[in-house]
Image: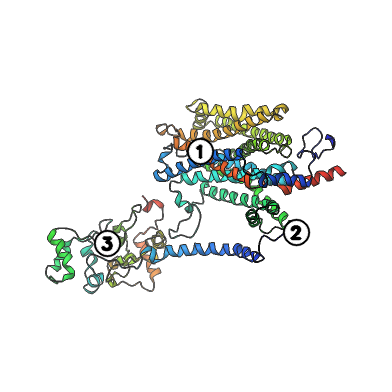
Amino acid sequence: MDPEGSPNIAGAGEAPVLEPGHTLATVTDKISSIVLGRGTTKGWMFGFAIALALLMMFNVAVTYLLIKGVGIWGIKIPVGWGFAIVNFVWWIGIGHAGTLISAILLLLHQKWRTSINRFAEAMTLFAVACAGTFPLLHLGRPWLFFWLMPYPNPMWMWPQFRSPLVWDVFAVSTYATVSLLFWFVGLIPDLATLRDRARKRATKIVYGILAMGWRGSAVHWTRYETASLLLAGLATPLVVSVHTVVSWDFAVAIVPGWHTTIFPPYFVAGAIYSGFAMVMTLAIPIRKFYNLEDMVTMRHLDNMAKVMLATGMIVAYGYMMETFMAFYSGDQYDRYLILNRMTGPYAVVYWSLIACNIVIPQAMWSRKVRASVPALFAISLIVNVGMWLERFVIIVISLSRDYIPSIWNMYYPTKWDWMTYIGTFGLFFTLFFLFVRFLPMISIVEMRSLVRETDEKLEK
Amino acid sequence: MAQIFHHSTNLISRLSIYGGVFIIALLGAALYGIELSPWYTDQHVAREQPVPFSHKHHAGELGIDCRYCHTSVEKSSFAGLPPTQTCMTCHSRIWTNASMLEPVRASYRDDKSLSWTRVNALPDFVYFDHSIHVSKGIGCTTCHGPIAEMPLTWRAGSLYMQWCLECHREPEKYVRPKSEVFNPYYQQPKNQLELGRQLVKEYKIQSLQNCSTCHR
């Protein structure tokens, strides 16, 4: 098959979304054999052991927190929102790319989403799990978390519905529910494939239960398509709404540096920016270790780099407008805030953020950089760091110096802050390692339909 | 290919999906029921005491005024528990040999307080003041129940915030004339709402529901 005639949906010159030579059978074989044929490799065990060790560190940090209370963290008035909220916003933002890829790009018929959507959705779920732990632990008495929900109770109490913090509870729990359903519904036909291909009886039973009796009949397929479309429709507004509500946690307050109308769009763009960076961070090692370069092609990396470039520019615009509005408003507190960011005690953090989020990613304008896997991997890591620094700048710098100079104070994270934060990587990667080991990390069904469609195109 | 699951699995899986919803709902309702039950709140459960003191006998049959023992109820947040001397004003003369009263006499002899079992105790994070309630026309029996009919004292209310708010939201349903506050046999008149509204106005009763009213 000559390269011009390869299953290439885009125009000539761009890499294909699926390397030539794949048939329905080879796609299914390749993906399902990662789960069923490959077994538990040494490399996997090594990675899983590190992740599990970090998860155990997280358990230690959380246990000590439950015994001692949030005083073990660095939070101290005026900075009541330290690492916990920084990490919450960071993790929840990362999740957004998964939803964007699986919902919006599905509705827009972007074929290149097919091979990355499954693990991007898994990333969303695990990131939301990590994000969710932080506000709960930050409650101080996490065992009373159910007070956040409106339910009949003998206190005759309802949550304060005028507070964005309560909207956040609904936004995040809706997001987690819809993401889980979407992911699971998409998995059902693939689980049935694994059930049918499994050799051991126990494996058959486990995948059989998860496949919920899928037989692949026409009725099943119609319902599957309808459910997927409905869930995609439900998930689409969530891409925008969840981080909008998160931004209201800040924008509704009157703290200088928080009280701005630009927050919702700039938070959403930042969320997608960091999310794509994380998808890239995960996709590059996965395609290498599992030899999936033919399914997660350079086309995917190139497209993700472009999305990052675009959302990164929106974020840069947001930073510019924050600075401009502080000057233009003439408000002394807003002006001082910007000055304090640039030249105050946390100036290093601010300038690192500008370097990580705005300056370095500009390299992706170059086609050469977008074609270099190591360069993209490095940039994706840098953007992840940059987006974390952004949340630190917004939360800590704003709080540490607000209206009254007599209450100004510095915030320093303690070792428990770091252990909790790094520990969530343990949670995230433990779940992710289990996912790549036991579930098909690329959607078999959708890859098969991609093969069919590219074949039809060839026949024309 | 052989079947992995028996045909009956279809029924089980359907039942577990539909049943799950009902089981979760029932579990929630059961938990709520337990939370409201006397088993959990001690409402209407008579407490054992070092001496089986009967409010029914003293406040009811003998007609001793509440303030004879609970002296600070009009002036202080705490209604006050009587010292043994108060008991001995009568019991140094009557029932002087009753074995039931031996702990009282022992307390008097040894100058050691009786340690009663507290029946109505609010949590420490709640600020409550008896004097303001009593002076605005809230009777003893409104919160403490039919005290003149309790051989051993029990808790008449659940002490849940809901129970406080029932009155704080609609004081006109519970308020009585100030002259009747210490009457343990007071019955609400038929026109309670009409009278209540009038008294709320007259006594300038505010329907205080701010968090900081009680959680200071």
Residue A402 seen: no
Residue A198 badge? none
x then y, percent, for residue B68: 20, 64
How packed mark 2 is, by other alpha carbons closer than 10 Å (few <14, some 14-19, many 20 or more), is few
Mark 1 surroundings within 10 Å by alpha-carbon count, few (fewer than 14), some (14 through 19), many (20 or more): many
Work out how far the residue at label 2 is from the one at label 1, CA to CA, in angstroms: 46 Å
> Mark 3, chain letter?
B
Amino acid at circle 3: Thr
Name the residue carrying label 2. A217
Distance (Cα) linking label 1 and label 3:
48 Å
Viewed as shown, does residue B155 lie left or right of A7?
A: left
Q: Which image quadrant is residue A430 in?
A: top right
Name the disc covering residue A421, or none.
1
Question: What is the chain letter for disc 1?
Answer: A
Q: Quadrant of the C terminus of chain A?
A: top right
| Residue B108 picture location, percent across and down | 14, 61
Crowding near the residue tagged with mark 3, few <14, some 14–19, many ≥20 C-alpha atoms within 10 Å:
few
> For the view shown, which residue lies furthest in the top direction?
A343
The residue lying toward the viewer, choosing from A81 and A301, is A301
Can you say whether A395 is above or below A193 in the image? above
